[in-house]
Image (cartoon, coloured by chain):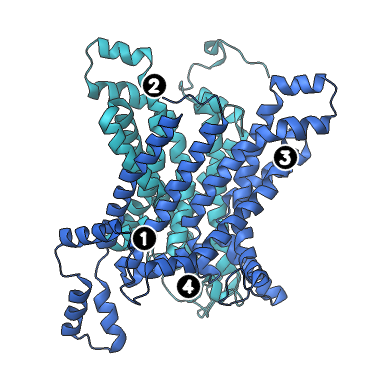
Amino acid sequence: MITVRDSSETVPERTPRFVTPAWRTLRKHPTGAAGLVILILILLFILSAGFLTPHKYDRTLSGKAAPMMSRGFDDELLVLGGDELGRDVLTRLQHAGRTSFVIGLAAPLLGVTLGTIIGIVSAYRGGVVDLLVQRVVDVLISLPGLVLAMAVTLALGFSVWGVIIALSLNVVGGSSRVVRSHALTQSQLEYVQAARALGASDLRIIFRHLLPNSMAVSLVLFTVGVGAAITAEAGLSFLGLGVQPPTPSWGNMLTFAQQYFRFGAHIAIIPGLTIAIVVFAINLVGDSLRDILDPHLRGRG
Amino acid sequence: MRDYIIRRVLLLVPNLFILATLTFFLARVLPGDVALGLVAEDGSIIDQEAVEVIRERLGLNDPMPVQYARWMLQLLQGDLGKSDVSDISVVQVVTETAEVTFLLAILSVIIGAVMAIPFGILSAMMRGRWPDQVIRTFSAVFLALPNFWLGILLLLALVTWFSWSPPIFQETFLDAPVEQFQRLILPSIAIGTSFAAVATRLTRSTMLEVLNQDYIRTARAKGLFPNRVIIRHALPNAVLPVITLSALLFAGLLNGAVVLERIFALPGMGVEIVTATSERDFQLLQGLVLVLGAFVMVWMLLIDLIYVALDKRIQLE
């Protein structure tokens, strides 16, 4: 492929400046682009909850575990069948997607943000602060993640927010470690020393210099975290310790999968498969993003 | 080197202290306590007096600092305490449940590594050709499958089509190794394949990196057989990160296999922790979390120290 260095010649005048680079990036990373397309389709599917099907997610429409494409009591069409209480699986899948996506995005966002700030401050201040903060991080990393999540959800009640906070705590330790090691090398570099020599305050150095420079690392940690959080939510809800019924989530849709498998395998397969597809797409996007953002890892993996 | 080891080992002391403190407060943030549950077991009407008697006996009525001081003093004496519910010592619960959890973790890591290393090497050797594409696709797919879901599917497939379900029994591994293996193999496969997905990618990328190194070119230039170059020269260096990953995963699995323990009804530490949490058995919960956390800490320290000892390039501060 021939690339023209001077972009002003190739870009038609009316296209906004960011469109061409974005399109070129997508062309260069076809797997990432494919992941993005899958994610957008799934988001559209979730956002159409309430429009796509005429059913309610918490209404019993058919017998237990009605098969796919079957008819309910009032002759409604259940495209993906009914679940263990005869509720429409397709409608529940959409509503559950909202819960799972909100948790999947919010938990790593909260956790990585906190981890990033802790990591940078710990690396920049060094000394006693670093020593103390890292001891707490040591403990956070070695604590059983699920225990932490369980205790927090129980304490905060089984709300969506409870689960978000619980799962974000699992991310804080690990992400702060990674950001700290990155910030440690950064804070030794000349530009930080120059800023300090110019009389910049600590806060200014942290927020204007160190934070923007660790953004790439944090963004990669975030994308990895999304897939992990969706899976973790599913595990927690499966145990009955996450989002509680009647609010559906992809995890709690699987709770009864085991008992009803003989009557309707679709109850177990559909939510699990959905999680797998979403995580697959996120991984594709995340891998490409890592290639784009982190030059050290370029061309690996 | 010696100073580094001493410093790292000494740091375990504050770490353990913070861990013990955190587990204590982790238990106390749980709403309610064990007394209500214990009384409710006897009859449907909750006898308020009986509740108070139990609370008094277990010291749950004392102020929080007093309870904390008691827990710390007890730990300093090397006593992990007894379960509030069943009066069995925490140490005994650990010895009874650790076997399943540890065996599950070991078996999963072995299965994962045994799949990942050959596939990763093959993938690197055949870079860009169809075996590479196939292996990479599979690893991407298995990376996305939640391992507990894979566990459910495996279990149900065997039950439905082959009418086979894992045995249920009480004996230990030494008494009934075959049954124990049969019971653990399905969850291990479920966890192992997820792990293999990550480890295959890692093996592939480190292998590719190693193959570009000068010493490999030298070995080839000397006229060694290609297989010998791979096995004798490239493999040991390419496998090192995978072994590290396995060691880290092993630590993670001790904590993270709860869902699979639950699905396969395995009497492991994870399930015990969930039960202790739901019964508000503070002593048992604190004890189990402390033991697991402390083990993971020591394990990670060992990995670090082994690395420092093996890799001469690591410069200590």
**Which quadrant holds residue A113?**
top left
**Camera-side residue: A294 or B57?**
B57
Give the label on residue A87, or none. Answer: 4
Label 1 resides on the chain identified as: A
Label 3 resides on the chain identified as: B
Is circle 3 on the same chain as circle 4?
no
Disc 3 crowd rating (10 Å Cα; few below 14, some 14-19, many 20+) is: some
Residue marked by disc 2: A186
Distance of label 2 from label 4 (alpha carbons) = 54 Å
Tell me which chain appears blue: B
Residue A300 spot, x, y in % from top left: 61, 30
Say if residue A240 shows up in the picture.
no
The kind of residue tagged 1 is Met
Give the label on residue B133, or none. Answer: 3
Is circle 2 on the same chain as circle 3?
no
Compare marks 4 and 1 and give the one earlier in the sequence: 4
Badge 4 marks a residue whose secondary structure is: loop
The kind of residue tagged 3 is Gln
